[in-house]
Image (tube, grey):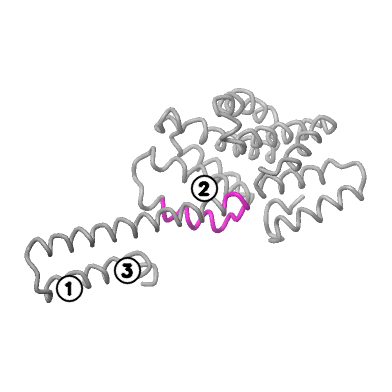
Amino acid sequence: MIRLLQSWGMPVVMTIAYATLAAVSDTSTTGKAWMAIGLAFVLVVWFLFRFLTEQAALSRAVAVGDAPRVLELVGKQLRRRKRPAARVPYLVYQAHAHELRGDFPAALASLDEARLDTVSRTAWPTWQVLASAVRVGVLVETGQVADARRVLETELAPAAAKLDPRFHPTARLQVTTSIGRVLAAEGKHADARPMFQAVLGDIRAPSVLRAVARRELARIADDPAESATHRAELEKLVPDPSSFLRRD
């Protein structure tokens, strides 16, 4: 009931108010028509505001790695959308959230359901980068390092190359983080460290990528004190102790 009121309460109240005003006002048919146009304008603005608010909330949840919030918002959108192309962004975000929770089978299932071939040519690289980065992360965490390397080189890197780094800095950071994760999984720690340091040194890096970089640096650090420092910073970025990023 609360969700119903949040979604339709204001439009219903405004419609009743405008209908009452039109019924009791001493005006011509033209005047009532202008009232109807005003109501339509108000409703359009309301639904546009709701859409932008939900998108902003989803973007923030993804950036900070708030997996439960991402899944909540994505679930609402997936229930509304039936076209494959419209579902792609939310399925990719859903896969990302499942990865952060450590639910790797669910992450792969969401990626497999997302039909990236249905989105527009201009939108495809953006969603391919995030989807491939999630797949690389899942493959690394499940020990399928050779497959992770293949996805990195054949899917992630080519898609990122199609994006202008000035307008899509996160895509480049996704590639850098994924390269670091694959190198670390291959035991090439010396080569992996500069990748993660580059992410931490970029002010445009979202919190979730910083958290991944801190986690990986803590895992491959030779000095226990250095590892403890990275873990302390990771706890600041990811205060939830149950988060996958806080696990070893």
Report the residue at 59% width, 23% height from top: 154
Q: Are marks 1 and 2 in contact (CB under 8 Å)?
A: no
Q: Is residue 173 left or right of residue 184?
A: left
Q: Name the residue beneath numbered marker 2.
A: 94
Q: Amino acid at mark 3?
A: Met
Q: Of marks 1 and 3, which one's residue comes earlier in the chain? A: 3
What distance separates the C-alpha of mark 1 from that of mark 3?
16 Å
Q: Amino acid at mark 1?
A: Leu
Q: Residue furthest toward the left?
A: 28
Q: Are marks 2 and 3 in contact (CB under 8 Å)?
A: no
Q: Of marks 1 and 2, which one's residue comes earlier in the chain? A: 1
Residue situated in front as seen by the camera: 39 or 90: 39
Report the residue at 7% width, 63% height from top: 29
Foreground disc of the pair 2, 3: 3
On screen, residue 64 above or below 209: below
Q: Name the residue beneath numbered marker 3.
A: 10
Q: Of marks 2 and 3, which one's residue comes earlier in the chain? A: 3
On screen, residue 102 above or below 116: below
Report the residue at 87% width, 42% height from top: 221
Q: Name the residue beneath numbered marker 1.
A: 21
**Image coordinates for residue 50, horizontal then vertical, percent:** 40, 58
On screen, residue 120 above or below 55: above
Q: Is residue 105 magenta?
A: no
The magenta span reads 61-77
